[in-house]
Image (tube, rainbow, N blue to C red):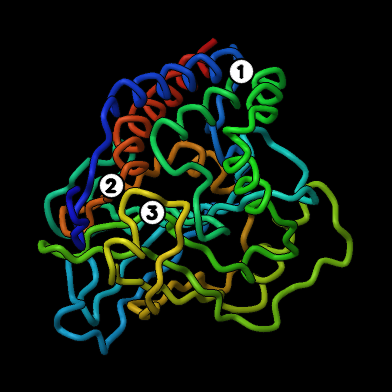
Amino acid sequence: MVQAEIGREYPEEGEQESINGIIESVKRNLTRVYKKGHENRQFHAKMHACIKGTFHIANDLPADMQVGTFVSGKSYDCWVRLSNGNTRVVDDRKADLRGFAIKIAGVQGEQVVKDISMPATHDLLLVSYPTLLAASIKDFKKSIDAICNGIGGLILFTINPFNWGIVKRTLNSMKKHDNLFAVPYWSVTPYRYGNGNKAIKYKLVPTTTNLTKPAHKHATFLQDTIVADLAKQDITFDLMVQLQQDAVLDPMEDPTKEWSGPFTRIGTLVLPKQRFVPADTQEFGDNLTYSPWHCTKEHQPLGAINRARKATYDAIAKFRIEHNKKTTTL
């Protein structure tokens, strides 16, 4: 038995076959659901807001933590997309996984995968729960297939005892939220930190007080709280990283397990006070493509699910954008 090592990946057999199956399932589902209409993302279909912000790197980062994008004193423009995790546009009052995607612009260095919508970016994809539902690419494919096969597929998936761990984790991740600026977000999956064997996970921690409490909850109330909070103050978050300290306790390949180490602050995200009108950036946000692989090599995604994301995100983004171009000319 090979002893696990810090910073090392352990690919599973048959990964590419599973990845190809995921891509085809999602394409078929998007074509079926949206037909000739505007095609949303397969996941995180409902966008609450696309907001321009600034990301500031901490001035006191130790020398060994100054890597790639994260160099003390640097600041970047960025675009933040807040969303519900559901595959459909659903009522904000329902329990759901929430998404917080950050596109940091103008980073230096050779891109691992170039963004088709904006060059030289570093994307951070975070969600409102610290772990993922699937432990492997095969399990991830089973989940995607179930979702893409509609109610019947979900029922068959749910009644199978072998899938109950995935079902339980999915239900645990779905929460009701009053204000998305009050929620912490996690990267769930690991990433390289530098050119050695250092690996990390990200966490975004809210730091703004006196946030809006919704007086009346309705289908789009989360967007209303975003508008109200931006009208009265800057919104801030601390970006933290958690180092992999033990290859067994902090597994690289299983994102259903939380890591054990402390988090260290590396920067601050600022969404400035403004009169925010969601419709002004709706089309721009819809056309943005986010992927964890939009980054430089110092921040390369690691682990099974990230390997699956590489081909899947790129293929689905291109498929969705091409579909929407065609439907707007009909």
Q: Is residue 217 left or right of residue 327?
A: right
- Residue topped by disc 3: 189
Q: Quadrant of the C terminus?
A: top right
Residue type, label 1:
Asn
Q: Position of residue 226 (x, y in %)?
A: 66, 63
Q: Are marks 3 and 2 in contact (CB under 8 Å)?
A: no
For label 1, the SS is loop
- Going from N to C along the chain, the mark reached first, 1 or 3, is 1
In the image, residue 253 sits, relative to residue 262, either above or below, namely: above
The residue sitting at 35% across, 53% down in the picture is 123
Q: Residues within 10 Å of mark 2 (few under 14, many from 20)?
A: many
Q: Are marks 1 and 3 in contact (CB under 8 Å)?
A: no
Residues under labels 1 and 2: Cα distance? 30 Å
The residue sitting at 74% across, 73% down in the picture is 212
Residue type, label 2:
His
Q: Position of residue 21 (x, y in %)?
A: 40, 19
- Going from N to C along the chain, the mark reached first, 3 or 2, is 3
Residues under labels 3 and 2: Cα distance? 15 Å
311 or 258: nearer the viewer: 258
190 or 260: nearer the viewer: 260
In the image, residue 120 sits, relative to residue 72, either above or below, namely: above
Q: Are marks 1 and 2 in contact (CB under 8 Å)?
A: no
Labels 1, 2: front one: 1
Q: Is residue 175 left or right of residue 294?
A: right
Task: Please identify the quarter of the rendering in which residue 191 is found.
Answer: bottom left
For label 2, the SS is loop
Figure label count: 3
- Residue topped by disc 1: 149
- Residue topped by disc 2: 294
Q: Is residue 50 left or right of residue 77?
A: right
